Image (cartoon, grey):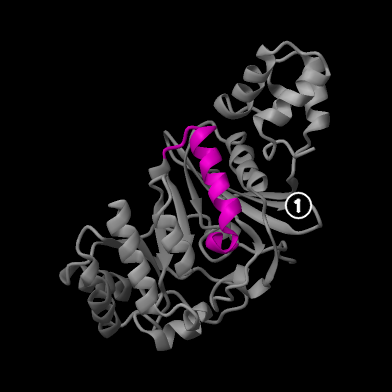
Amino acid sequence: MSNRYGADRSEYAEVLDGIAAPSYRLGQTWDALYKQRTPLEESTSLPLVLRNSLTSKFPLALTEVTRARDTAGTTVKWLWEVAGGAQVETVLMRYPTRATVCVSSQAGCAMACSFCATGQAGFERHLTSGEIVEQVLRAQHDSPQPVSNVVFMGMGEPLANYDATWHAVERMHADLGISARRLTISTVGITPGMRRLARETLPVTLAVSLHAPDDELRNVLVPVNRRYPLAEVLDAASEFASTRNRRVTFEYACIGNVNDSPAQARALARLLRPLGALGSHVNLIPLNPTGGYTGARSDPGRLRAFASTLLDNGVNTTIRQTRGTGIDAACGQLRSRPRVS
């Protein structure tokens, strides 16, 4: 039998039939799980005996190891253990009227980006679609605001676990009612997956982690660039933008005196200009510290100058406001083991 958020309606129907529950209980159960988004144990629309039976038949896939909150209490990070002993992390970011969940698609990551804590830890295994969806629901249980956005920017490379990632996307859209445009899939540039994504029916948002304006530097920062070089990544991004009529976001972690010079800003603008003003958007991310990388974030003035150069050259640009750095919950900081003090 599947775990709680990996099981489909037919599996729940089979169990309910087996205990001679009325047929309408299936709809009530599904509504409790995905419309009301309440823990099954607390779903008072179902009789206690039925709840106990269902929780026994459909256990949770994620076991909480630790939970950390930032000082404002609006960013929460969970470390979970999944079957086989692998560990993954999930981040909830709450805003006044909504919430965003950053989910992991793999335990660890095989992409080995030099400045990323997840890449430094290596790869353990793919997550199932149920394990991905459960991250969203478990975070929702901790948030008074509705989860309206999900970003696949946690541990792992989503397009290296394509089938489970896409099935999770379909579940979030159909069962949780989250708009496809508010589901963001981030990739370091797995071009076959990007092209496949362009042919899917749901108009999700694509974010590409670029981090360098040339192949020489990107080979060092993002080693998979040797397999999928910049020209191929940009071509796949252009295909996605034109096919889906959606602009692509390019993530760019700004590392002091490594990839943040005025010349590099101009080179990045030249690289992205062919996509057009509606084809791309650059999201500049001040580098977040990790134990395995000695680089430092860009000086604020240098970062602003980099952004201004891009804007002056016709490239839509924003500087991301980082959240969760103090609890190692920001971009590039997620890891598969808790830090030992």
For label 1, the residue is: 82
- What amino acid is labelled 1 in the image? Val
Image location of residue 162, percent across then percent down: 56, 57
Q: Residues within 10 Å of mark 1 (few under 14, many from 20)?
A: some
Q: With respect to residue 135, does 269 lie above or below?
A: below
Query: Which of these two is toward me, 182 or 258?
Result: 182
Left or right placement of residue 64 versus residue 251 in this view: right
- Judged from the image, the secondary structure of the residue bearing numbered disc 1 is loop
Please tell me which residue is depicted at 57% across the width and 46% down the height of the picture.
Answer: 167
Q: Is residue 139 left or right of residue 322?
A: right
Q: Quadrant of residue 157?
A: bottom right
Q: Residue at x 55, y 39 (%)?
A: 171
Q: Is residue 196 left or right of residue 31?
A: left
Q: Is residue 114 above or below residue 92?
A: below
Residue 37 covered by magenta stretch: no
Residue 2: percent from the left, percent from the top?
A: 75, 39
Look at the image and tell me whether residue 263 can be seen. yes
Q: Nearer the viewer, residue 42 or 198?
A: 198
Q: Which residues are magenta?
A: 156-179
Quadrant of residue 117 within the rendered picture: bottom right
Magenta region, mostly helix, strand or loop?
helix
| Closer to the camera in the image, 3 or 325 | 3
Name the residue rendered at 41%, 89% in the picture.
216
Magenta stretch holds residue 164: yes
At 45% from the left and 69% from the top, the residue drawn is 191
